Amino acid sequence: MSKIAIVENQILSLEGAFNDVLSDKAIKFKAEAEFAVQVLMNNDYSLGIAVKNPDSVRNAVMNLAAIGLSLNPAKKQAYLVPRKNAICLDISYMGLVELAIASGSVRMVTARLVHANDDFEMNGLDREPTHKYKPFAKDRGAVVGVFCAAKTNYGDWVTDLMDIEEVFAIRDRSESWKSGQKGPWKTDEGEMIKKTIVKRASKMWPKTDRLDEAIHHLNTDGGEGVVEVIGGRDTGVAAFDVDHWLDAVRAANTDEEFMTQYKAAGAAAIAAKAGQQHAYFKQQAVEIRTALHARLNPETAEEQQ
């Protein structure tokens, strides 16, 4: 059997589990499965990793369902990317914006880079800033900052901004940058700058589970979490106790309780730099969450059987 046939069969086998955790019913498994197969088929390196590490493909596809985004390349919301010998789900800043709007957190979001030659004026945190520039100018100058303006469902504006030094300070402390590997900060710097401000600005928006889960995913599996440094070395050397965290999610009586423990486990895994143990934990946690949903919604579970 060819490599692509192996990966395709593996992805297609996830249909039931995918639909069990799907947070946006408008997303269709067959379409997302086709997008996933196409991505891996068009990249020999990614395809090789998918065959060697099938659990990472499962985790990426299941995370896609739980967060509720699409791999449709036309939408530019999410991608399957190779990272540290695994296939990982990456979410663009446009994906985060889509989640914020679709989940009812805000009505609209604008995130833009500010160049040295632009005319930019901040009008307060509760108003949209004034940003004028010549979009077709050959030289707008270097990027000096970025802003994000969100309009709430009540018609109010919530604005946040960062100068480029703040953005790069966060970049320099993220796992994805510290790894030194080729990644989005090197290939798509502008998009990553926008993602950085959207992630920070979202802390001021009304909370939604889907948006929180997406940002949590980026900070854990995505390697975009900030690494705290004390005394010239990274902190977080304590062991990651897989059994402890599996017991914690098993003890959850609601999906909210489950996600609280799930996110705490992800933070602990980052601190302990326990990538492999965290991958195993996530694989088991998917099944635990599916069982929890079946327990909370027995009628739905019986219909699916």
Image (cartoon, grey):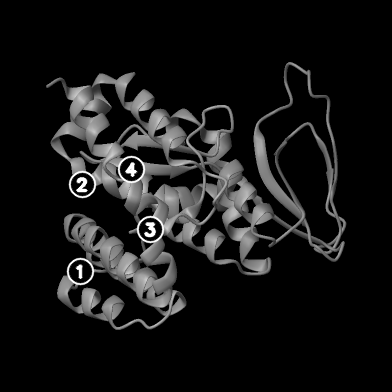
Q: Amino acid at mark 2?
A: Asp
Closest to the camera, between mark 2 and mark 3, is 3
* Crowd rating for badge 4 (residues with CA inside 10 Å; few <14, some 14–19, many 20+): many
**Image side of residue 25 versus residue 265, left or right:** right
Q: Residue at x 52, y 44 (%)?
A: 27
Measure the C-alpha gap from mark 1 to mark 3. Answer: 44 Å
Q: Which residue is the site of mark 1?
A: 237
Q: Are marks 4 and 3 in contact (CB under 8 Å)?
A: no
What quarter of the picture does the C terminus occupy? bottom left
Q: Are marks 4 and 2 in contact (CB under 8 Å)?
A: no
**Image side of residue 92 versus residue 10, left or right:** right
Marked residue nearer the N-terminal end (2 or 3): 2
Q: Which residue is the site of mark 3?
A: 304
In this rendered view, identify the residue nearer to me: 258 or 167. 258
Marked residue nearer the N-terminal end (1 or 2): 2
Total numbered labels: 4
* Crowd rating for badge 1 (residues with CA inside 10 Å; few <14, some 14–19, many 20+): few
Q: Residue at x 39, y 43 (%)?
A: 89
Q: Amino acid at mark 4?
A: Cys
**Image side of residue 218 versus residue 283, left or right:** right
Q: Which residue is the site of mark 2?
A: 55
